[in-house]
């Protein structure tokens, strides 16, 4: 059985009707806040965000009656920038706000397809009907005609289906794959489609989203994905949209304003919890870090609270987590590299060309990059041998003497075998004064048993010491025990054992409940960490997916949140890394790459480590996850953050 969704009915917004409401008194407060020189922005902000949209409409009428003036016009005159856009938008009826967003998206030279997708894919039938009427009233034209006049193809057809609010079976004959998607997603009820998606997952062993991505493209693909995401969970869809609006290169303020306004009286509490479950911070803190001034204060008021402080778990989030683990457990992921063996490969020719590129004054870096980044690792090892046998020289030494800094580290990393490279990265993470715990976690939680065993052998051969001894001398406590367990390369293999998964989940759950009752004393904290370690460090990934799913069912909580809330320091990071890797390893690496490049400075070592180690495994999958999460391609991000040209080739673009 699945966890109950007991909280799905009823009000889930953050903005409600103000008690003891007096429209005339509020109108007077706003009038006084705007008269004279300057404006009392704090008074305006507090009043507008403290009233429901219906109450704001009464204030607009009272303002007109008392002062003979248009409140929205006065607000536009007195306020400026993003704060003005946000406050004025809050004063419009929701349907008219949606109408303006659609009108702005299609007027002028370009079209904001993302806005059209978000609004039309996420509104229910009644909201669509209200939007159509408001658009006609505000602009004197038919919204369907305006939208179809500005769009084309299957994208246009699906927008029309959504505008007509069709959720009943149709009889029309459909031909192409695109038309079938339009017919199914535009003409079936939400509950029916949720069952269709589950059955599709069972038959195809992949979510319907993967088929949409492989069969469709462009704006039509994005629209259909949005429709599917909204059918699965509207709050989760908006959580993703909010995250993308604030991540990456710049803030998409129009999107941020639109969503915070339109969902503040509907399901902002659920969006907040979905946001915290999907990303490693609360929506409140993300807004706080990404915006400023009165604009920030208004958005935070609409957000309504900081979930990182509250530590609560809503039933809706547990329901979504259960479905997420179900999808993760039944999806077969096809790993796709970006580097493949070169055709017509001649190691002797490559060896001689590399030597020419390094002879004399100066180095032809382009030649080196073009050869090394376009050969598989196995082919690079043949080049190393050919370089030695034909030229009597050590290719690695020549490269080190001719190249410098990050380019040298990257090229040398590519020339090492995967086991040698991993061993070197482990060594680098432990040498010197500090320890790179994140690197140790990343490597050990993502490598297979065979890869870890090969890494152990390479480490001993290269550094005359076992990796286990190195870890134990450089780390301590429970964190050291976790790494030592992982470095054995003895994780169980094979599919999930459902009965055993239930037992494992109950062990974890009972441990957590003991912690809560005992107020997380030190002894119980140790007990929890030991039991979590005994399961997370030894069970197979397929089995752990079922364990985490059963954990949700048993506790109505998500394993990630328990780890973040109950553990701390390196132990928390290690446990969390295992869970994220089990859930979606490509996404885990995508987030590691993002963190390596965001903010002040670039973590070049992490960037090189991941790009080299995953280029022949699943870098294409990682690229897709990066784009989906951050609305910016990995290629674009690397271009902004680094000048190393070989990254572009390694990236496969």
Image: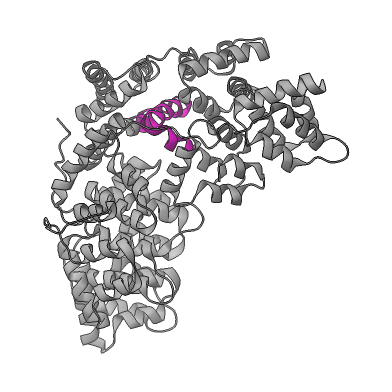
Residue closest to the eye, 610 or 248: 610
Residue closest to the eye, 434 or 465: 465
x and y percentages locating residue 435 in the rendered image? 59, 26
Q: Is residue 621 above or below residue 116?
A: above
Is the magenta region chiefly helix, strand or loop? helix
Q: Image quarter for residue 140?
A: bottom left
Residue closest to the eye, 113 or 138: 113
Residue furthest to the bottom = 68
Is residue 452 something that shows in the picture? Answer: yes
Q: Is residue 158 above or below residue 473?
A: below
Q: Quadrant of the N terminus?
A: top left
Residue closest to the eye, 635 or 604: 635
Q: Position of 495 compared to 22: left or right?
A: right
Give me the residue at 35% from left, 64% from top. Answer: 115
Is residue 269 something that shows in the picture? Answer: no
Q: Position of 424 compared to 199: left or right?
A: right
x and y percentages locating residue 251 in the rendered image? 46, 59
Give me the residue at 73% from left, 22% from top. Answer: 386
| Magenta-drawn segment | 563-590
Q: Is residue 507 above or below residue 83?
A: above
Give me the residue at 36% from left, 68% from top. Answer: 86
x and y percentages locating residue 81 in the rendered image? 45, 72
x and y percentages locating residue 38 in the rendered image? 44, 79
| Residue 565 falls inside the magenta stretch | yes
| Residue 365 falls inside the magenta stretch | no
């Amino acid at each position: 059985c699945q966890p109950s969704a007991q909280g799905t009915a009823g009000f889930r917004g953050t903005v409600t009707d103000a008690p003891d409401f007096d429209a005339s008194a509020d109108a007077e407060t706003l009038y006084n806040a705007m008269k004279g020189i300057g404006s009392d922005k704090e008074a305006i902000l507090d009043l507008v965000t403290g009233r429901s949209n219906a109450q704001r409409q009464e204030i607009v009428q009272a303002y007109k009656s008392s002062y003979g003036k248009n409140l929205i016009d006065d607000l536009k005159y007195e306020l400026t920038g993003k704060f003005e856009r946000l406050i004025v938008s809050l004063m419009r009826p929701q349907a008219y706000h949606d109408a303006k967003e659609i009108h702005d998206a299609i007027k002028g030279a370009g079209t904001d397809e993302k806005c059209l997708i978000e609004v039309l894919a996420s509104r229910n039938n009644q909201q669509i009907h209200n939007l159509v009427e408001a658009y006609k009233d505000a602009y004197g034209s038919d919204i369907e005609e305006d939208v179809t006049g500005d769009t084309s193809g299957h994208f246009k057809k699906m927008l029309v289906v959504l505008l007509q609010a069709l959720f009943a079976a149709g009889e029309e004959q459909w031909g192409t794959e695109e038309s079938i998607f339009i017919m199914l997603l535009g003409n079936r009820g939400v509950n029916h489609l949720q069952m269709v998606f589950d059955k599709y997952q069972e038959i195809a062993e992949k979510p319907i989203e993967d088929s949409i991505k492989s069969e469709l493209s462009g704006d039509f693909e994005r629209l259909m994905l949005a429709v599917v995401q909204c059918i699965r969970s509207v709050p989760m869809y908006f959580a993703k949209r909010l995250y993308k609006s604030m991540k990456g290169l710049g803030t998409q303020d129009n999107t941020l304003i639109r969503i915070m306004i339109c969902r503040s009286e509907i399901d902002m509490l659920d969006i907040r919890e979905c946001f915290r479950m999907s990303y490693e911070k609360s929506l409140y803190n993300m807004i706080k870090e990404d915006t400023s001034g009165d604009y920030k204060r208004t958005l935070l008021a609409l957000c309504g609270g900081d979930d990182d402080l509250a530590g609560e778990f809503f039933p809706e989030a547990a329901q979504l987590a259960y479905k997420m683990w179900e999808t993760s457990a039944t999806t077969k992921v096809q790993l796709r590299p970006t580097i493949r063996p070169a055709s017509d490969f001649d190691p002797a020719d490559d060896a001689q060309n590399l030597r020419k590129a390094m002879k004399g004054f100066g180095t032809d870096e382009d030649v080196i990059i073009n050869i090394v980044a376009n050969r598989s690792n196995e082919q690079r090892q043949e080049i190393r041998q050919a370089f030695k046998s034909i030229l009597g020289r050590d290719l690695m030494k020549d490269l080190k003497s001719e190249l410098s800094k990050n380019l040298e580290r990257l090229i040398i990393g590519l020339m090492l075998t995967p086991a040698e490279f991993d061993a070197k990265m482990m060594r680098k993470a432990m040498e010197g004064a500090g320890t790179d715990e994140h690197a140790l976690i990343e490597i050990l939680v993502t490598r297979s048993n065979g890869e870890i065993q090969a890494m152990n052998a390479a480490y001993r051969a290269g550094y005359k010491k076992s990796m286990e001894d190195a870890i134990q001398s450089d780390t301590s406590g429970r964190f050291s025990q976790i790494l030592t367990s992982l470095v054995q390369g003895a994780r169980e293999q094979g599919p999930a054992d459902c009965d055993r998964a239930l037992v494992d989940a109950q062990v974890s759950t009972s441990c957590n409940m003991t912690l809560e009752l005992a107020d997380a004393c030190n002894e119980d904290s140790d007990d929890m960490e030991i039991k979590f370690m005994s399961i997370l460090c030894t069970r197979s990934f397929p089995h752990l997916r079922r364990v985490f799913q059963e954990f949700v069912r048993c506790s109505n909580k998500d394993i990630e949140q328990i780890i973040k809330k109950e553990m701390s320091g390196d132990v928390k990071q290690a446990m969390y890394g295992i869970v994220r890797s089990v859930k979606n390893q490509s996404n885990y690496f995508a987030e590691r790459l993002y963190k390596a490049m965001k903010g002040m400075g670039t973590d070049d070592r992490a960037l090189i480590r991941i790009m080299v180690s995953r280029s022949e495994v699943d870098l294409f999958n990682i690229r897709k996850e990066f784009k989906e999460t951050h609305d910016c391609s990995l290629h674009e991000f690397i271009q902004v953050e680094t000048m190393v040209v070989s990254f572009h080739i390694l990236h496969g673009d």
